[in-house]
Amino acid sequence: MEIKRFDSLEVIQLLSNAFSNNSIVPIVGAGFTNGCRLRNGNAVPGGQKFKSLMLNEIKLKVDDESYIKISSEKFSKIANFFFDENFVSSAKSKSILKQNFHGVILDESRRRFVNDIDWKYIYTLNIDDAIESCSKFNVILPFGPVNEESKNNRSLFKIHGDINYEICHDDSKLIFSSPQYFKSLDANKYVLSVIKSDFNNKTIVYIGCSLDDEIELSFISSNTEVNNENHNIFFTCDELDIVRKQDLKSQGISYVITYDQGKHHQVYDTIYKAYAKSLDEHPEFSEFKQLPIKLEPDADKNEIFLIKGITEIQDRSDNRVIPYYYGERTIEDDIVNDIKGNALVVIEGGSFSGKTQLMYSLANKLLDKEVFFIDSKYFLDKFVAIKLLKRENAVIFFDSGSIDEDIGSNIKKEIQGLSDRGTTIVVALDKNNNRIFDILCPSIINDVPHHFLSSKLGECEVDNINTLAYEVKVPKFNKGQTLLQNIYNSFEVFGGNVIVDNVELSSDFFCFLYVIGIQDSAATGESFYQAGLNVESLKALIDRYHPFVELEKVSIYEAEEHSGFKVVCNSKAWLYSILRRYYIEKTDFCVKTITDVLLRFKGNNTSLFIKGLLFDTINELFSGDRRQGAGHGAGNLILKLYDKLEKLVSNEPEFHVQRSKAYYNIYSDRDDVERLDDIIRNLKFSSTYATAESTERNIRNQLALINLKKCYLLGSLSSEIVRDTIRSCYNCIKDEAVNSRYVIELLSGTSKGSGYLESLIQIIDSSPSLKLLLLEFKEEYDFIMLRKGDIQRAERMKNR
């Protein structure tokens, strides 16, 4: 443990480095507001002063001998008596709390500490309202569950409770006394888990803390692994004797920063100075401004890039690399023209359709614009995104997975402003990301240019690649195959399958790969912890499988992440091949492990639970290469998984949407069509509980498609089945835009759904009784046929 003065150069650099690495976390104690003015004219008491206030009330109920004994105890034990109605009434204790902790007014140096430094979150041991009353921080209280949305806002974790809650509620969520402390250790698991994650991975800075009786922090410190890269920093103006030094050392303190007695502003000025230094040393958004670089015609480097997804480039720390054999996609020129004339452009495609490489290529063609590229590995912070949208004469590329619905809404709201500033946003979306697509492209007359990138390469695209691939000895790409299958072919020629075949198929490794896969090849540390993996296991896996996977620090531009790190997979071909091996060799194991992980996510992280459920994602992850049976999907695993989950998460609307997609795409048993009735019944149940508009639309769409498939499998149809199917099709499209993906999926001449609909129409046309039945719902049927004709005419015009 080192002791330094607040104004030493070493302290400024230590703190500045922590800011630059996005690893600094403040924990604010009673000393932060001790002595601050209150609106009622009082001042916020320190620990000793409030201890005296509690004792004054307790003294009225006990004899002198008992009072002497109680007054010799520590703060938390005295609080046991103060919050016991046998000694102090609830009304009296609440009144005293309000008089001393409500309406705090911070001075300028403290306000600057709170507002002028871009803290993602702050922990406070105080119950007063000082921080939230002068800032945009949102209070997170003890005991209550915390949803994923908190990461999109600035969070103030109030470990000991909140004065405003105490004033407005009969129950209490304060943590002052020993019973309250121990209750918090058991009940406040989320907050304690994220603090523990911070302790394991971040630089903790204690400001105004005594570290004397904070049982939660003692509990966490005793369970924290030593991490030599990070430091626990303690600010104090007290003289430290040998006992106190040892106490701090046992608390895990590595640096004690001293300042002058009563000069608390020295603490806040020092921290702000270090923050400003970190900004000077790292220009804003610099990591998003490096343009992609194309590899030279070096056969070795191109081979390494194809197998491992990464290669060494001199003077580059990023992995924005275009392989030499990249061939221009046919839609590139159209997209460039749309970028020049529009504020928003959307590119949609499968997760291995080449969206990233396409965007890299586009970025190098826009030489008259300031170009920013936010890769998939970034989980962008909302406030950073809003600031980025204000740039002038810029093109900002958001790769798939880098924005959420909230940022998507901000982009849509900012369209006119973007246009006025000459800035264009280009968003890449996976084809199953309906929610963000619906936010960005909601209108009936779709004024947002939208391009779909096929996973299959066109003839001229293959020719473009092969001309360059030959020069660097990359195996020939084949026409009619997907981009992923062509990569697999080369992967096999270069010996990648030998790597995959030699991998040990352990339980932890499967969980590790699955968590990375459902997050588009970049997973946060917290997500691994929530899935049940520990630090030792993660470190071992990363070390063993580097450079296919790499450990990276979370950027200052990313959303709140308590672990401070993420794991990025550089080769999807490697990831998919190994997961497919697991499926082929251990199907039941895969089903059980995915189920266990999803149930853990359900209790901790709703968004990851949903990501892990998605049919398209699971199908893609386990499809594998040709040698492993690519093209046949993972139907056996998927149906087993959803049937197992049906008993465990049957009250989740999104689950039933995804299960219905699986049965629509995979199920084909004509002898057990009644099984689809269960799917239909659960979709109808889910529609009554769905809260998100996108989920409601998905349910309507799936009801139509499942009913159509049921008709197709049955062949011989009753009046009731036809009636239900026509009505579900009408309900699906009646309120949808002409070009809605739901309408196209149902009525397009090339979609599976339209094929099932065509089959139903033919059955109706050949049956006089069913034709007569149509009179009951002629309006609905005519509307479907009208829309069908419009869509298919538009398709024919487009293909001329």
Image (spheres, rainbow, N blue to C red):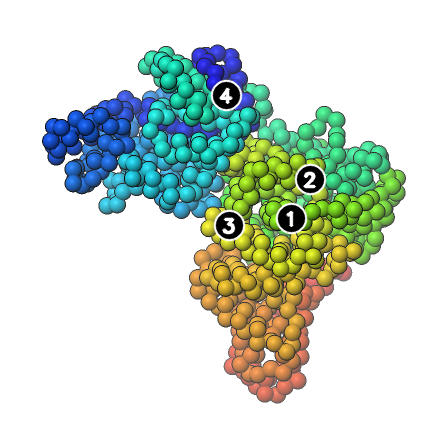
Pick whichever of labels 1 and 4 is earlier in the sequence: 4
Q: Is residue 563 visible?
A: yes
As rendered, which of 19 and 369 lies closer to the eye? 19
Q: Secondary structure at mark 3?
A: helix
The location of residue 220, given as percent across then percent down, is 43, 34
Q: Please, is residue 344 above or below residue 41 in the view?
A: below
Circle nearer the viewer, 1 or 4: 1
Is residue 60 or residue 110 the one in the foreground? 60
Nearer to us: label 4 or label 2: 2
Q: Which disc, if any, is residue 545?
A: 2
In the picture, the disc for residue 601 is 3
Per the model, the C-alpha gap separating discs 3 and 2 is 25 Å
Q: Earlier in the sequence, mark 3 or mark 2?
A: 2
Q: Which numbered disc flags the more N-terminal residue, 1 or 2?
A: 1
Earlier in the chain: of badge 4 and badge 2, it is 4
**Number of numbered markers:** 4
Dot in front, 1 or 2: 1
Which of discs 3 and 1 lies nearer the camera? The answer is 1
| Residue found 57% across the figure and 35% down from its top | 565
- In the displayed structure, would residue 91 be above or below residue 446? above
Q: Is residue 233 above or below residue 300?
A: above
Q: Residue at x 77, y 52 (%)?
A: 485
* 10 Å crowding of disc 3: few (<14), some (14-19), many (20+): many
Residue 266 is situated, as x and y percent measured from the top left of the image, at: 40, 15
Classify mark 1: residues with Cα within 10 Å, few (<14), some (14-19) or many (20+): few
Residue highlighted by disc 4:
15
Q: Which residue is mark 1?
A: 506
Q: Is residue 499 left or right of residue 90?
A: right
Q: CA distance from mark 1 to mark 4?
A: 40 Å
Residue type beneath disc 3: Phe
For the residues carrying marks 3 and 4, which lies nearer the camera in this image?
Answer: 3
Q: Give the amino acid type for the residue marked by disc 2 in the picture.
A: Tyr
